């Protein structure tokens, strides 16, 4: 036995309000405007944030380079050769001379 | 006044026509479902003005995303899910009304007698409170059947459930609302 129907008419949308709402919806809506997006469209949607992020990274990189460059200018230049060639051997390298056995021994003893 | 029933095949045709740019079909589709959208929104927001806003926004959103409704025969259920979600968001946004009765008595220009308006507002308040306490499915079934005049079969197709389940939910919803109304009346007295 089904319970008697509940009178819900006080909750009903009045006819005049329904007309107003329908008109408002039709004035606002463009059917299918937000069509489903394909994979390419979804990827294209990432173009802006990706570009923005790339621009941000580029800005930070440039700032870091500029800051590092200004610091490096204050310090004496250190080349790879400076790091690899011992100070005692520098004159031989500069003159293109071959050290004698005694020079090498003397250099060996002094080096530590 | 109930504009439904309409068989779901007709709804599917209206959806297809609306997608093809048929303005008359779009208007018919909106008109047919506006009452149900409002009823579901009212069940959640429990405020007529909020319900109108939610129903309107949800309907606009649904029309703009109509191509995403994969099965046009299920348009009513799809629409009402949008309405319910928007109404819940609205209620969450306002941060109130979930359990409280209407704090402002909504008096619409309905009659010339303020007492009648007040009585109507109180009745609407009681009803919306009772309906608002129902579980979601029961509430939708009750509103679609007893307020909008949809048939069991149409509700079943819209909500994706057998006719028997619709009857079951309707039975429980009516019983719960009646019991709740009696309690509310006793509390008010």
Image (cartoon, coloured by chain):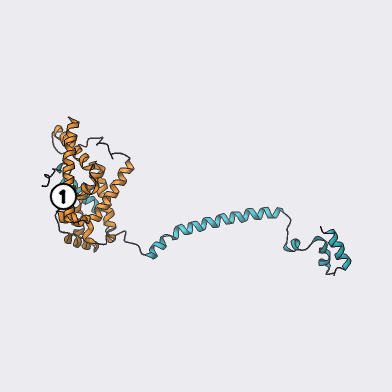
Chain colours: A cyan, B orange
Q: Is residue B15 left or right of residue A83?
A: left
Q: Is residue A102 left or right of residue B48?
A: right
Quarter of the image that includes the C terminus of chain B? top left
Instruction: Say which residue appears at 81% left-offset and 67% top-offset.
Output: A93
Q: Is residue A47 left or right of residue B74?
A: right
| Residue A76, position as x, y percentages in the image | 74, 56
Q: Chain of mark 1?
A: B
The one nearer the camera, B35 or A55, is B35
Q: Is residue B155 above or below residue B102?
A: below
Whether residue B170 can be seen here: yes
Q: Secondary structure at mark 1?
A: helix
Instruction: Say which residue appears at 17% left-offset and 33% top-offset.
Output: B185
Whether residue A13 can be seen here: no
Q: Which residue is mark 1?
A: B145
Quadrant assignment, res A112: bottom right
The residue at the far right in this view is A102
Quadrant assignment, res B19: bottom left
Instruction: Say which residue appears at 19% left-offset and 57% top-offset.
Output: B157
| Residue B39, position as x, y percentages in the image | 21, 47
The residue at the far front in this view is A1
Q: Is residue A110 above or below residue B110?
A: below
| Residue B54, position as x, y percentages in the image | 27, 47
| Residue A33, position as x, y percentages in the image | 30, 59
The one nearer the camera, A12 or A8, is A8
């Amino acid at each position: 036995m089904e319970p008697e129907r509940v009178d819900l008419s006080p909750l009903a949308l009045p006819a005049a309000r329904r007309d107003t709402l329908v008109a408002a919806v039709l004035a606002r809506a463009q059917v299918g405007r937000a069509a489903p997006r394909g994979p390419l469209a979804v990827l294209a949607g990432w173009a802006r944030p990706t570009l923005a992020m790339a621009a941000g990274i580029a800005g930070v990189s440039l700032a870091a380079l500029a800051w590092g460059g200004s610091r490096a200018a204050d310090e004496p230049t250190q080349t790879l050769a400076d790091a690899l060639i011992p100070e005692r051997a520098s004159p031989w390298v500069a003159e293109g001379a071959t050290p004698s056995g005694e020079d090498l021994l003397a250099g060996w003893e002094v080096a530590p | 006044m109930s504009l439904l029933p309409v068989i779901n095949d007709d709804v599917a045709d209206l959806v297809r026509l609306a997608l093809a740019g048929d303005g008359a079909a779009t208007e018919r589709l909106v008109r047919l479902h506006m009452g149900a959208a409002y009823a579901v929104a009212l069940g959640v927001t429990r405020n007529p003005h909020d319900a109108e806003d939610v129903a309107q926004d949800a309907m606009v959103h649904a029309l703009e995303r109509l191509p995403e409704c994969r099965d046009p025969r299920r348009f009513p259920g799809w629409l009402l899910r949008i309405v319910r979600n928007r109404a819940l968001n609205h209620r969450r946004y306002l941060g109130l009304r979930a359990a409280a009765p209407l704090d402002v008595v909504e008096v619409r220009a309905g009659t010339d007698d303020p007492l009648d308006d007040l009585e109507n507002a109180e009745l609407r308040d009681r009803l919306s409170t009772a309906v608002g306490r129902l579980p979601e499915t029961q509430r939708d079934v009750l509103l679609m059947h007893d307020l909008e005049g949809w048939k069991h079969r149409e509700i079943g197709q819209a909500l994706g459930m057998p006719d028997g389940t619709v009857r079951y939910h309707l039975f429980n919803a009516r019983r719960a609302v009646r019991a709740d109304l009696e309690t509310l009346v006793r509390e008010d007295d």
